[in-house]
Amino acid sequence: VVSIKKNRGIYIFNTKCGFKEENLKVDKVNNDDMDYVHMIVNEVVNIRPRKEKVNNSVDNIKLISPDYSRHLEVIRVANRGIVIKDNLVLLCYEEDDDQYIIPGGGLEDNETNIEGCIREVKEETGVIVNVKKEYLVIDEFFLNMEHINHYFICEVKEETNKLNLTDLEIKHNLKSMWIDINEAIKIFGKYNEYKDNISKYGLYRREYLALCKYLENKD
């Protein structure tokens, strides 16, 4: 018997856990049963929060990493904001790892995807945004994890310059910056150069596709 446990947007399948408020037993969890697992989690554990009036149609992309074990144990849900100003896109930059990322992160308890996106963008960049629409979901499979990324097109409401970073983000010297969107696409488009670093390869491939899809949906 496998149970699903929620912790800050992360859902862990554990073989030794009973029924509790946020736990649900299912018969098995493997790659062939994911549609069933998603149905159960959506309805009972609320992995994708209540429906929000954002957009009628959302593109979906599935990415399977070369290191995916085909044995799923963890699902993580994240919400990311595409924030554009004068053809510049707002990105985070991890100085220690020399890598860029679109701002966003996991859900807090009882947050909707929109609320999670707004909070994460503000915490990581100091920019308060309005969400215009969700345009993309990228489903990543790597190691023993599925990483579900919801992407939202946002507009700037206010720039506060006040960040609220986690200890890990501080450790990696996370900064935010505005970069020409075409330059950002070039940066992420070099993902094939990082095949010896599977984490950065997967991250850059995902963000490259997200920005390309944004250009298709921006109007």
Image (tube, rainbow, N blue to C red):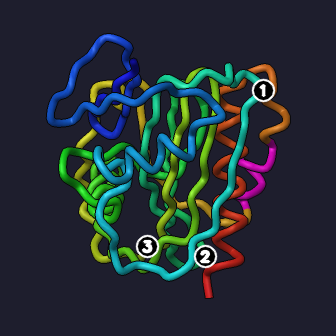
Which quarter of the picture shows residue 41? top left
User: Which circle's residue, 3 or 1, is located before the other in the chain?
Assistant: 1
The foreground one among 37 and 105 is 37
The residue under the point 19% across, 45% down is 109
Look at 66% across and 66% down and name the residue there.
181
Q: Which residues are drawn in magenta?
A: 183-190
- State whether residue 37 is above or below residue 56: above
Residue 50 position, x and y percent, is 29, 64
Residue 184 part of the magenta segment: yes
Farthest residue toward the left? Answer: 21
Image mark for residue 66: 1
Q: Amino acid at mark 2?
A: Asn
The image shows residue 11, relative to residue 17, as above or below, that is: below
The span from disc 1 to disc 2 (Cα, nearest Å) is 34 Å
Q: Secondary structure at mark 2?
A: loop
Residue indicated by mark 3: 154
Closer to the chain start, of discs 1 and 2, is 1
Residue that mark 2 sits on: 87
Q: Amino acid at mark 3?
A: Cys
Q: Position of residue 127 (x, y in %)?
A: 32, 63
155 horizontally vs 128: left or right: right
Which residue appears at 56% of the width and 46% of the height? 35
Choose between 50 and 118: the one closer to the eye. 50
